[in-house]
Image (spheres, grey):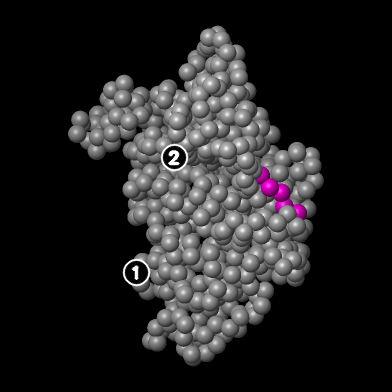
Amino acid sequence: MNEPESSPYLHRLRNHCDLLYPDIAPEDVAHRIEEVLQGVKKPRSSGNDLWSSRDAILITYGDSIQRLEESPLQTLHQFLKATVDSDINSVHILPFCPFSSDDGFAVIDYREINPKLGDWNDVEQVSSDYRLMADLVINHVSSESEWFENYQSGRTPGAGFFVEANPDEDLTSVVRPRASSLLREVQTPQGTRYVWCTFSHDQVDLNFRNFEVFIEFLKIIRIYLDHGVEILRLDAIGYLWKKIGTTCIHLPETHEMVRFLRTVLDEYAPGSILITETNVPNQENLTYFGNGNEAHIIYNFSLAPLMLHALLAGTSKYLKAWMMSMPPAPMGCTYLNFTASHDGIGMRPAEGLLSDQEQEEMVRTIEKFGGKLSTRKLGDGTEKVYELNVSLFDALQGTLEGLDRYQVERFICSQTIMMALEGIPAFYIHSLVATPNDTELVEKTGRARSINRHQWDADELEKLLDDPQSPQSRVSSEILRRMRIRSQQPAFDPSAVQFTLHLKTHFFGFWRQSRDRRQSIFAINNVTSRRRSLTLSDLNLIVTDNWFDLLTGERFDDRSQKIALAPYQTLWITNWKSD
């Protein structure tokens, strides 16, 4: 590396090493990094223009759609081109490596594609048409991995790669997302050892105090980038660093590691994007922006439970209060907005935002609608609901009062609110195609999360999407229609201005304005099952502009008129439309 001693890059490396690897010379660190990443494939995006209103992400497993005698990744690619087209321009393929458990999140070999899904060529084919996001499962690895087998035999790579602890130490402060025991007993050449397992005994935590672990992950990142991955999702990153006597979550070293990765990627692969997965209370989640020098994107985790509550309870009170308190993302950063994922709807991000009573009412309602619950263990040994496991489509089949006839309308409202908010919208594939609860898969696997991990037969799904009366067709066609409209609006740029509107709680409204101030959009959503009247004078509609609804084309010439919104109807009232 020919970097001058005073280069900003080397200066940042020194700062990272001071906290993470003080016993290694920064110049040696820089040399090892260059050996791994020199000549890496550059992403298509420029470092100064990472996203626009055209960006949206589809989240899917590699085998969520299947057809006989086709690799699932090929089937997925065909589905994307035939159904999604360019209305959603990015795809997050959930872990696609060989694995031993947790539907991919216990990785056996990061360098290979699960042969049941396809191969690297299939991944590259998807990345040639869509911006590709992949999981860097960075906190832990499968107990069946070569690394862990080598650790148990005292060989490298693997020896020194895992976090050991003494079971006699006080570990009650450790924050856990699971109710299983934290430590796993194993036999090594040095005798009995106890390894740290934040999630399960098949997912053994890696020791990032060991610089060689960091280097191994840089090698993995290089493989991903060279095969077309542009967005790296740092799975479970909050738990990465351990210190006995602390909570072992969000430690300063963990944040420094995110900054370290950001520094390296900005140097060698500018245009690549880091997104942190931290399913935690809102204020903790926001810290992963750092000072604009950690994650490019953070998940808007609180949106999902608050959105669900608003539509079940018929009030935007808590959703609006949260939104008013949310800071705009730092320059060069943005939010990833989502309402459903493969993991269900996390309840930790609702802590401090919804009261215990409101959470309990929501939990009981989801159970009535066929949903399941996952729990986590607290320090005192008690358990608390960690997430709601349910298909979002079935979670919205009614309200707190019970089932009704507005399931499709209520569900489309949830997705429309999401796609209009500051940030980038992300649609779980089972939301895009209105997949109901898969209770049969839960019975088969014995895992609550399977309820929202259905595997569609491609031909069956295509028939449903071709039937204009099916929920799958009604939902997907309307979501994609609205996305086509959204993508043309500069006021929906992820970095465009956003303000929450002070309307009655049966509405949830906010104002977006393009960065050049030419376009304003007032997004008004009826979150109830009753018709509601909106007085236009409650909005700041500039008298010299002509205002109309982007979704229906209806024009509003009388600024004092009242408009009746049908149950769960959305208006995108704007003063400008692209040619």
Q: Is residue 572 visible?
A: no
Residue in the image at 19% along x and 34% along y:
6
Q: Is residue 175 magenta?
A: no
Residue in the image at 45% along x and 80% along y:
539
**In this picture, which residue range is highlighted in magenta?**
370-374
At label 2, the amino acid type is His
Residue under label 2: 250
* Image position of 499 (left or right of 105): left
Position of residue 183 measured from the top left corner of the image (x, y, whole percent): 58, 25
320 vs 364: above or below: below
At label 1, the amino acid type is Asp
Q: Callout 2: 10 Å neighbours few (<14), some, many (20+)? A: some
Residue in the image at 39% along x and 56% along y:
329
Position of residue 119 measured from the top left corner of the image (x, y, whole percent): 61, 34
* Image position of 308 (left or right of 288): right
Q: Is residue 168 visible?
A: yes
Q: Is the N terminus in the top left, top right, bottom left or bottom right quadrant? A: top left
Residue under label 1: 516
